[in-house]
């Protein structure tokens, strides 16, 4: 533990806590803040939005297809029958089933997967496990494209780097944008894709400053505060 503490302290000395970094500076500095040499740390983005999630018309949620993926192997469950079940398997789904799969989750509390897709006709059956899947962010939802008849597209997008997000009670959206090994350019492009979509999803009822702050960090390293004005200016000019 002491060794990890020294590494963190050394990384922290490289960070100007008062500075708001632009995208290029932040992602160039990020590799120097890596703490662990035992695994490829995930890079996370935390965006604080000027919304009140208590109001349904200010709930911000969606899914983004990161240009360079997440670097993570995603285990996918598909709730489907017949030809759609076969289609899901051919697309690369890890587990496919219908009532049998619902029963397994219900009786065994089995949750050995990262994402779930369902055909519309299965939603009535899945409703039995909504209280299990919902709190864990695993409930299929048509708004993010995981309730669909095109299961091939949904599975391939999830496997390829599709990231679902939802604003928390505190108004913050947390999402991974890749692995530290991706390098600065790929991580910047992934982060821009997420931020650009968040800006597009601004609720019409949200007043005042919308993107309040953006922070960037690795799994174990210290965070960097980003310059929101610079980032939004670049996206608008794009």
Image (spheres, rainbow, N blue to C red):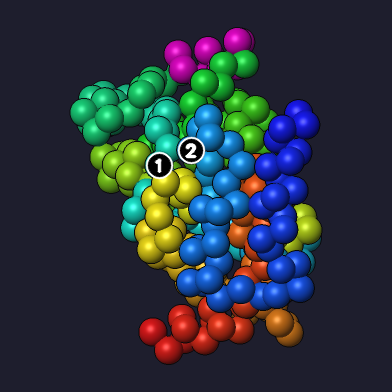
Residue 233 in view of the camera: yes
- Residue 58 visible? The answer is no
Q: Quadrant of the N terminus?
A: top right
Asked if residue 138 is among those painted magenta in the image, a careful observer would answer no
What label sits on residue 175 in the rendered view? none
Which residue is located at x 45 percent, y 13 percent? 100
Q: Is residue 52 left or right of residue 231?
A: right
Magenta stretch: dominant secondary structure: helix
In the foreground, 40 or 31: 31
Q: Position of residue 47 (x, y in %)?
A: 64, 64
Within 10 Å of the Cα at label 1, are there few (<14), some (14-19), or many (20+) other Cα atoms?
A: some
Which quadrant of the figure contains the C terminus? bottom left
In space, the residues marked 2 and 1 are separated at their CA atoms by 9 Å
Mark 2 vs 1, N-terminal side: 2
* Residue at disc 1, secondary structure: loop
Q: Residue at x 37, y 59 (%)?
A: 186
At horizontal 66% and vertical 60% (from top left) the residue drawn is: 14
Determine which residue is flagged by label 1. 71
Image height of 92 relative to 140, above or below: above
Q: Which residue is mark 2?
A: 40
Residue 118 relative to residue 131: left or right: left
In the displayed structure image, the side of residue 1 where residue 39 appears, left or right = left
Figure quadrant of residue 77: top left
Numbered-mark total: 2
**Residue 188: percent from left, percent from top:** 44, 64
* Up/down of 97 relative to 164, above or below: above
Query: Which corner quadrant of the image does residue 71 belong to?
Result: top left
Image marks 2 and 1: residues in contact by CB distance under 8 Å: yes
* Magenta residues, start to end: 100-108
């Amino acid at each position: 533990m002491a060794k990890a503490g020294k590494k963190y302290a050394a990384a922290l000395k490289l960070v100007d806590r008062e500075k708001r970094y632009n995208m290029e500076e932040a992602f160039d500095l990020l590799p120097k803040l890596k703490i662990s040499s035992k695994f490829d740390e995930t890079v996370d983005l935390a965006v604080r939005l000027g919304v009140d999630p208590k109001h349904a018309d200010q709930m911000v949620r969606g899914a983004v297809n990161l240009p360079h993926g997440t670097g993570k192997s995603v285990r996918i469950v598909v709730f489907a029958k017949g030809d759609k079940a076969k289609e899901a398997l051919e697309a690369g789904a890890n587990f496919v089933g219908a009532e049998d799969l619902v029963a397994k989750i219900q009786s065994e509390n089995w949750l050995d997967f990262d994402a779930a897709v369902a055909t519309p006709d299965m939603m009535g059956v899945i409703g039995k496990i909504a209280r299990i899947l919902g709190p864990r962010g695993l409930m299929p939802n048509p708004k993010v494209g995981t309730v669909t008849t095109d299961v091939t597209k949904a599975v391939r997008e999830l496997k390829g780097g599709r990231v679902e997000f939802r604003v928390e009670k505190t108004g913050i959206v947390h999402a991974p944008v890749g692995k530290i090994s991706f390098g600065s350019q790929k991580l910047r492009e992934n982060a821009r894709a997420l931020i650009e979509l968040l800006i597009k999803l601004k609720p019409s009822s949200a007043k005042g400053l919308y993107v309040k702050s953006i922070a960037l960090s690795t799994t174990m390293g210290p965070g960097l505060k980003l310059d929101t004005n610079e980032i939004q200016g670049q996206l608008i000019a794009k």
